[in-house]
Image: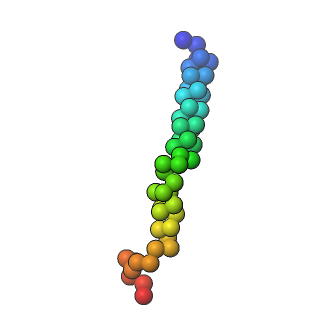
Amino acid sequence: MDINVLRGVIAAVSFATFIGIVLWAWSSRRKESFDEAAQLPFADDDRCGHA
């Protein structure tokens, strides 16, 4: 196996992983949990001890 073939395989696997992460992040099934997580900084709770 030539080093350039190995580099090509690694590039293809990396690209496929990137596309998989993008599809997972933009999935409509994940929208509700991402919206909930986006609102966490604005949640009204007193866990940090401030009045």
- 6 or 43: nearer the eye? 43
Kindly indicate the quadrant of the structure image that contains residue 9. Answer: top right
- In the image, what residue occupies the spot 37% across and 76% down? 47
| Residue 39 x, y percent position in the rendering | 50, 67
- In the image, what residue occupies the spot 50% across and 73% down? 42
Q: Quadrant of the N terminus?
A: top right
- Report how many numbered discs are placed on residues in the image: 0
Question: Does residue 43 sit above or below 38 in this rendering?
Answer: below
- 23 or 46: nearer the eye? 23
| Residue 32 x, y percent position in the rendering | 48, 57
Any part of residue 9 in sight:
yes
Question: Does residue 8 sit above or below 22 in this rendering?
Answer: above
Residue found at the very far bottom of the displayed protein = 51
Q: Quadrant of the C terminus?
A: bottom left
Any part of residue 25 in sight:
no
Question: Does residue 35 sit above or below 44 in this rendering?
Answer: above
- In the image, what residue occupies the spot 46% across and 57% down? 33
| Residue 43 x, y percent position in the rendering | 46, 74
- 39 or 10: nearer the eye? 39
